[in-house]
């Protein structure tokens, strides 16, 4: 049985390893019995524990296929659907929300999806310490917290220092796909990604939503309310 509360208490990061960039804000939430059961039974097969050394993703998945990192999968519904649409691609999905971790493992079992591995940890530290250079064919960051208030913009994940950490992990020709329903954040994303000489925008500005990314319930609700959604797809060229 994996007790994630105990896990985080016993694996506190030493002060000297704390980072100013964080991929999340720890949110409390109610874990359903089904989500907890999924963690208890599925984590040994589909979960990856954090460590301070690089891992072999091909070994983790048991095959040599393209690897995509997804940062912030929420409840995992879209992640599982994408994995079903792209069965020849492997997905390392990272989030810190306990119920979401339980839910994605539950969905993996229900949908019989074998090309996802799940982590519950800060994605920034995973990128820094666990991923080898040139390990990824793609990176997905869908609907990250926009931190609406201007004084909180510094907490946004998509900033040059973080993208700078991501780029060495991408293979040549690999891509970064971001999506947001907050226009001001979309502008910031476009500016940040456009600022890297070794990234090429695959569209004139914002991209059409790729076929593999399904529309989420949250996204559909926003569209009904007149909100826009912006996708950005950039490719590593150097």
Image (cartoon, grey):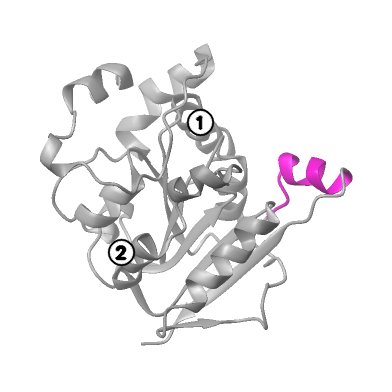
Q: Main secondary structure of the magenta part?
A: helix
Q: Which of the pair 10/214 is nearer the observer?
A: 10
Residue ID at (29%, 41%): 48
Furthest residue in direction front, as rendered: 151
Residue that label 1 marks:
100
Circle 2: element type: helix
Q: Is residue 221 magenta?
A: yes
Residue that label 2 marks:
165
Q: Which of the pair 171/200 is nearer the observer?
A: 200
Furthest residue in direction top, as rendered: 33
The image shows residue 154 at horizontal and vertical percentages of 44, 50
Magenta-colored span: 214-224
Q: Earlier in the sequence, mark 2 or mark 1?
A: 1
In space, the residues marked 2 and 1 are separated at their CA atoms by 25 Å
Local packing at callout 1 (Cα closer than 10 Å; few below 14, some 14-19, many 20+) is many
Residue ID at (32%, 22%): 4
Q: Is residue 133 magenta?
A: no
Please state if 179 lies on the left or on the right of 137 as rendered. Answer: right
Residue ID at (73%, 51%): 215
Q: Which mark is residue 32?
A: none
């Amino acid at each position: 049985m994996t007790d994630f509360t105990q896990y985080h208490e016993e694996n506190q990061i030493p002060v000297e390893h704390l980072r100013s960039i964080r991929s999340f804000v720890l949110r409390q939430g109610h874990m359903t019995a089904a989500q907890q059961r999924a963690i208890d039974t599925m984590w040994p097969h589909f979960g990856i524990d954090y460590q301070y050394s690089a891992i072999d993703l091909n070994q983790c998945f048991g095959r040599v296929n393209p690897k995509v990192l997804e940062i912030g999968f929420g409840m995992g519904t879209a992640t599982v659907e994408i994995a079903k649409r792209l069965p020849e691609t492997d997905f390392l999905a990272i989030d810190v929300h306990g119920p979401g971790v339980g839910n994605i493992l539950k969905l993996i079992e229900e949908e019989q999806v074998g090309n996802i591995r799940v982590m519950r940890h800060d994605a920034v530290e995973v990128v820094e310490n666990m991923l080898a250079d040139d390990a990824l064919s793609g990176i997905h960051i869908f609907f990250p917290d926009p931190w609406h208030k201007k004084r909180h913009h510094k907490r946004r994940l998509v900033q040059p220092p973080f993208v700078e950490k991501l780029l060495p992990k991408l293979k040549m020709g690999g891509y970064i796909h971001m999506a947001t329903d907050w226009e001001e954040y979309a502008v910031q994303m476009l500016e940040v990604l456009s600022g890297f000489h070794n990234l090429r925008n695959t569209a004139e500005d914002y991209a059409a939503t790729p076929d593999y990314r399904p529309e989420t319930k949250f996204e559909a609700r926003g569209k009904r309310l007149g909100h826009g959604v912006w996708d950005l797809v950039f490719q590593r060229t150097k």
